[in-house]
Amino acid sequence: MNFNGNFNNIADSYLFAEVAKRVAAYTQAHPDKKVIKLGIGDVTLPLVPEVIKALHGAVDDMAKQDTFKGYGPYEGYDFLRESIRSYYAAVGVKLDMDEIFVSDGAKSDLGNILDIFSADNTVLVPDPVYPVYVDTNLMAGRKVLFADATEKNGFLPMPDYSVDADIIYICSPNNPTGAAYDKAQLKEWVDYANKKNAVILYDAAYECFVSDDALVRSIFQIDGAKTCAIEFCSFSKIAGFTGTRCGYTVVPKALKKDGYNPNKAWLRRQSTKFNGVPYIVQKGAAAVFTEKGMKEIKQNLSYYMHNAKVIADCMDDLGIWYTGGKNSPYIWLKCPRGMGSWEFFDYLLNNAQVVGTPGAGFGKCGEGYFRLTAFGSKENTKEAVERIKALLK
Ligand code: PLP
């Protein structure tokens, strides 16, 4: 018997643990100080009334003989997949029902999708990056290459034809950098993937924050994407489902290679290892796409985007370089005065009692940068920004 030795190749996940440790030490030493946390990417506003109503209704369904539900379809109930299909249709993307798969969140699917790929594929991920892409591939023993995201390329690396990759991860708008590719840039990636016979795993978890017409909500808005991309999305950020758990993945039927059908393979994978998302949760998720639900959701999104603007305006005032904040709830800033990521973390904590996330925790290119999030309360965001301004002006 041998365990999977690849686990020995994965760095200990210490970023948020280290952040929590330093904050705990500070608050213990300074119990009188109010610390404001703009670090973690979790939402804070509660579920909207229309979703809550749907959840309650679904609980009642489970109490009655004629509406009770047992195991559901592996790929999700038709009522939710229909709503997702209409959501895509609204941005001009036509999908068949059997291209949409409901899951318990984007993180699970981003990891699980690797079951349908061979272990000898080479993977290309941007640096800095959402750590799930790297760790899940290292666990399976794949070779991982990095595309450097830097200030010079606006934290949006472009394809390099001298690099041969089989699986390419793109997250736009990006976590942690908040940067978002425009249509022309994504078209370059799609052309590269089609040419190289590669697949793009497109993480659209933050699509709901896109307001700029030059950007897209889905990679399938780009010509040629259906033959090279799989898209992952989530109810976490759009509707505050981080604790409720629901997401979806689109595997186009046009994506095929040498007789291998990834759409069929993914259904086979899901039906073998996954027994579906609770009916109650799917009912809540479907309410997101109703007219009333979406109206309420949009109020929450603009609440967060107002916070993002408050933080971005502060950086503008201070003359600090940053990405994000416009089509994204993240502001990725260059640490002032040449400080390193952890150095700035300590400086901000000790002198302004504001907590962010050190960019170095997301990859080597993140060193010297820092992430602030718009997911805090309006009052705390305003207070944090005032403190940052007073400290750095
Ligand atoms: N993808 C990105 C880029 C994220 O930042 C997150 C969560 O923060 C996820 C996926 C996870 O989404 P979910 O809550 O649906 O698992």
Image (cartoon, rainbow, N blue to C red):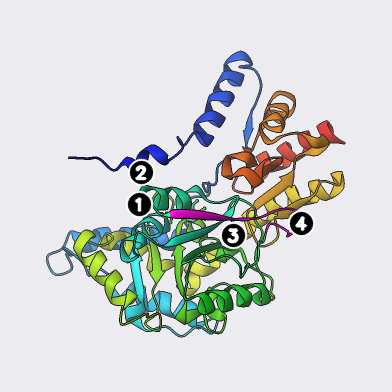
Please say if the residues under marks 2 and 1 sit with CB atoms less than 8 Å apart: yes
Which label is found at residue 301?
Answer: 3
Which residue carries the number 1 mark?
Answer: 140
Is 22 positioned to the left or the right of 344 in the image? Answer: left
Secondary structure under tag 2 reads helix
Question: What amino acid does circle 2 point to?
Answer: Asn
Point out the tag, 2 or 4, that comes first from the N-terminus: 2
Q: How many labels does the image show?
A: 4
Amino acid type at circle 1 is: Ala
Q: Which comes sooner in the sequence, label 2 or label 1?
A: 2
| Label 3 residue SS | helix
Closer to us: 215 or 369:
369
Q: Nearer the viewer, residue 100 or 182?
A: 182
Q: Earlier in the sequence, mark 4 or mark 3?
A: 4
Q: In the current view of this chain or complex, which residue is farthest to the left?
A: 65
Residue 121 shows up from this direction:
yes
What residue is shown at x 40% (from left), y 54% (from top)? 142
Q: How crowded is mark 4: few (under 14 residues within 10 Å), some or many (20 or more)?
A: few
- What residue sits right under mark 4 in the picture? 152
Spatial separation of the CA atoms under disc 4 and disc 1? 33 Å
Given contact means CB atoms under 8 Å apart, are the residues at marks 1 and 3 in contact?
no
Relative to residue 85, is residue 23 drawn left or right?
right
- CA gap, disc 2 and disc 4: 34 Å
Foreground disc of the pair 4, 3: 4
Does residue 138 lie above or below 233 as drawn? above
**What is the number of the mark on residue 175?**
none
Residue assigned mark 2: 6
As measured in the structure, the alpha-carbon distance from the residue carrying label 3 to the one carrying label 2 is 40 Å
Query: Gap between marks 1 and 3, in whole Å?
Result: 36 Å
Q: Which secondary structure, mark 1? A: loop
Camera-nearest label, 2 or 4? 2
Which portion, as a residue range, is magenta? 143-155
